[in-house]
Image (cartoon, rainbow, N blue to C red):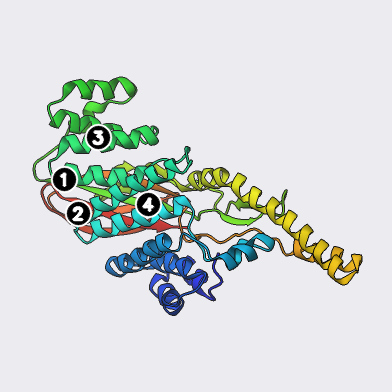
Amino acid sequence: MTEQSGFFSKFNRGEYQSAADSLKTKSEKEGKDQILYLLDRGTALFEDGEYKEAIEVLTKAERLSEVKDFTSINEEVVSVITTDTFKKFVPLDYERIMINVYLAVSYFMLGKYEDALVECRRINNLVAVLKDKGMKDFEESPLAWYISASIYEMQGKYDHARIDYSRVLAIEPSFEQAAYDAYRCAVYSNNMYLARDVQKKYPGLRLSDALKGRCKDCGDVLVLYSYGQIPIKRQSRYNSMLPEFHTRTHSDGNLSVYGDGGLLLGSGDVVLNLEDVARRNLAERINRIMAKRLLGVGTKVAIGYGVAKATKNEGLGILTGLLLQAATVPDTRGWSTLPKDFRIARIRLPKGPNTIDIRSQGASVLKKEINIEPKDLQIIPVRCD
């Protein structure tokens, strides 16, 4: 977690613009934590609805993450005998992917749908690169594919939409909304074979309901609900040389959307459990981190031996080795303003002005008036920590 004074207290109170402003200078100054400042500032701008500025900041973070995916010899030597915190911060794989997810949603909110689709495809390319590097347990973001599928459906490209909805189900089969969507798009593309295939995979769902009440003058609203706080990395309780995640949000959020007169319009399911993704990502990296730490132990012993030989003082050599070992702490930096998970509730509303009440844990989170156009698709991002 970055050491910016006041930022997190402002962010957690929902004072997103003020939080973003507090990091402006630090995020523009080159340094080992610049990418972290950019990521946290970008999140704050996104939550404040400043999508154009969020794109600028997160794009810079993405570019620096690629350029700085290397370490100078001096940095590497120092990190081997002490800690990786001396190195420039490079996001973990899931953090890199989340940059593109936020960029995709931001472009969508600005009505730049083709740019949003480009960001979704970049995620696919990045995942392919990660798998080539041995990250076999890492998958595409189902949230990104759901967004791209929704855009394709809005554009009338039903077969493209069905493919991406099916990708969501392949990664997150419990997200039942995507089953309704995949079935609907299969029917609209006149592919009843694929529609029946979806029905076979989800026999407990009345997928035909996805076609009921579909009017030409209606539009769709996706409530994108980000809940809780992602776990933060700390020094492991069992091995002081390694990091481990510590949970910050112990409850599970829920999402319901109500209309006029308290009518329940829909509820949301988890489309991306980011906490689970983060833990799996760190677990895949832990062996490499451990190997480097063991190399560091050997290096420190050698340095201690060298000091003892040079000074002819065995005690000083032992002390040097112990001091170096004490300085070994894991790198616990991370993009800590990410949520624990993302949920989506999809509702269909008639043309014209509508009022919706978004609730979580029985309490109203946001009441919003929206104007619906025929075949419209709107995303309403909502955050609750």
Nearest the viewer among 161 and 96 is 96
Q: Give the distance between the C-alpha atoms of the residues marked 3 and 1, in whole angstroms.
A: 14 Å
SS label for mark 3? helix
The spot of residue 15 in percent (x, y) is 42, 71
- Of the numbered discs 3 and 1, the one sitting upstream in the chain is 1
Quarter of image, res 153: top left
Residue 171, relative to residue 260: is it above or below? above
Q: Nearer the viewer, mark 3 or mark 1?
A: 3
Inspect this view and state whether residue 14 appears.
no
SS label for mark 2? helix
Residue 306, relative to residue 286: is it above or below? below
Amino acid found under the numbered disc labelled 2: Tyr
- Of the numbered discs 3 and 4, the one sitting upstream in the chain is 3
Q: Are marks 3 and 4 in contact (CB under 8 Å)?
A: no
Relative to residue 319, is residue 346 drawn left or right? left
Give the residue at mark 2. 113
Give the residue at mark 1. 154
Amino acid found under the numbered disc labelled 3: Ile
- Of the numbered discs 1 and 4, the one sitting upstream in the chain is 1
Q: Are marks 1 and 4 in contact (CB under 8 Å)?
A: no
Q: Nearer the viewer, mark 1 or mark 4?
A: 1
Nearest the viewer among 98 and 65 is 65
SS label for mark 1? helix
Disc 3 residue crowd, few under 14, some 14–19, many 20+, Cα 10 Å: some
Q: Are marks 2 and 1 in contact (CB under 8 Å)?
A: yes
Give the residue at mark 3. 163
Give the residue at mark 4. 225
Relative to residue 190, is residue 6 drawn left or right? right
Nearest the viewer among 359 and 102 is 102
Q: Nearer the viewer, mark 4 or mark 2?
A: 2
